[in-house]
Image (tube, helix red, strand yellow):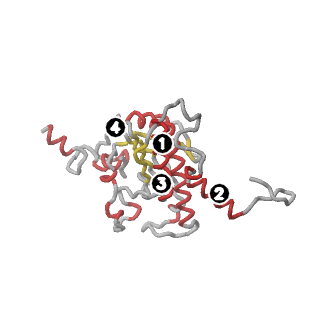
């Protein structure tokens, strides 16, 4: 009997424990769910609830179509990439190596803007979950907890990945919002740089700071966008009309 119960734990056959919470770390019924939400005491994954605020969400109807196009797709991607980079870099620098970070693009209250950060080590995730509960982001308090989700393939909507999900943003499986390829390359090259810096002798090389360097190749996509923007605008002028330096 014990083996059978263990085999169905967290599945749809389990009438005691909530399968959605086990797979996705969130359930649309919340505290009203008739099944148990087993919150993990240890996990590699830290959940930051409803952290990302998508400017386009308020401009969507129930079927997911846009009502108002106030923001271009390019501006929207830049807004999201900036958010992703801020959270990823700060959490990895402060708490430890991140294996993957995912942000939900769903519209349901239990999933909208959820950020799942899977650390390499469980102790790093535990430290992050405790510390981030004392933080604010974008003028709002951060709500963080350990999540049972470690295999995002099981949590993601396969129909959405194939462009065939009929429930749009109100699907109860994760619809993950992708970052730009440029940012992905930067984050992974940054990680490689950190690994190389750890392998070098600390007595050599002065104080460069791992993975960050000052070269243009190591600049973040945000820094490069700002540089291009300044180049397009040309030099600023002082109040007296003369061209000035940045």
In the image, which is nearer the foreground, mark 1 or mark 2?
2
Drawn side of residue 246 relative to residue 174, left or right: right
Mark found first going from the N terminus, 1 or 4: 4
Q: CA distance from mark 1 to mark 2?
A: 35 Å
Mark found first going from the N terminus, 4 or 2: 4
Secondary structure type for disc 2: helix
Mark found first going from the N terminus, 1 or 2: 1
Mark found first going from the N terminus, 3 or 4: 4
Residue 198 at x, y percent in the picture: 47, 36
Q: Residue at x 32, y 53 (%)?
A: 153
Q: CA distance from mark 2 to mark 3?
A: 18 Å
Few, some or many residues within 10 Å of mark 4 (<14, 14–19, 20+): some
Few, some or many residues within 10 Å of mark 1 (<14, 14–19, 20+): some
Mark found first going from the N terminus, 2 or 3: 3
Few, some or many residues within 10 Å of mark 2 (<14, 14–19, 20+): few
Does 195 sit above or below residue 84?
Answer: above
Residue 199 at x, y percent in the picture: 45, 36
Secondary structure type for disc 3: helix
Mark found first going from the N terminus, 3 or 1: 1
Q: Decide which of 30, 75 is in the foreground and name it.
A: 75
Assess whether mark 2 and mark 1 are in contact (beta carbons under 8 angstroms).
no
Q: What residue would you read off at disc 2?
A: 227
Secondary structure type for disc 1: loop
Q: CA distance from mark 4 to mark 2?
A: 44 Å
Q: What residue would you read off at disc 1?
A: 143
Q: Decide which of 41, 240 is in the foreground and name it.
A: 240
Drawn side of residue 142 relative to residue 43, left or right: right
Q: CA distance from mark 3 to mark 1?
A: 29 Å
Q: What residue would you read off at disc 4?
A: 40
Assess whether mark 4 and mark 3 are in contact (beta carbons under 8 angstroms).
no
């Amino acid at each position: 009997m014990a083996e059978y119960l263990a085999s169905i734990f967290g599945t749809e056959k389990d009438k005691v424990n909530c399968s959605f919470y086990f797979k996705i770390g969130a359930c649309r019924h919340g505290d009203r769910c008739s099944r148990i939400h087993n919150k993990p005491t240890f996990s590699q994954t830290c959940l930051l609830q409803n952290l990302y605020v998508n400017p386009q969400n308020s401009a969507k109807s129930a079927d997911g179509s846009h009502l108002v196009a106030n923001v271009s797709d390019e501006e929207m991607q830049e807004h999201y990439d900036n958010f992703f980079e801020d959270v990823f870099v700060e959490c990895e620098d402060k708490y430890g190596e991140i294996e993957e970070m995912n942000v939900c693009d769903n519209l349901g209250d239990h999933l909208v803007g959820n950020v799942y950060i899977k650390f390499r080590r469980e102790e790093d995730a535990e430290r992050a979950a405790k510390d981030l509960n004392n933080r604010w982001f974008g003028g709002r308090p951060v709500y963080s907890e350990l999540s049972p989700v470690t295999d995002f393939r099981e949590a993601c909507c396969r129909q959405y990945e194939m462009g065939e999900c009929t429930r749009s943003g109100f699907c109860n499986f994760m619809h993950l919002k992708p970052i730009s390829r440029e940012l992905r390359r930067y984050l992974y090259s940054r990680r490689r740089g950190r690994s190389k810096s750890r392998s070098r002798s600390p007595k050599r090389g002065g104080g460069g700071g791992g993975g960050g360097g000052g070269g243009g190749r190591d600049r973040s996509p945000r820094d490069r966008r700002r540089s291009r923007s300044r180049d397009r605008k040309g030099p600023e002028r002082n109040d007296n009309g003369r061209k000035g330096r940045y």
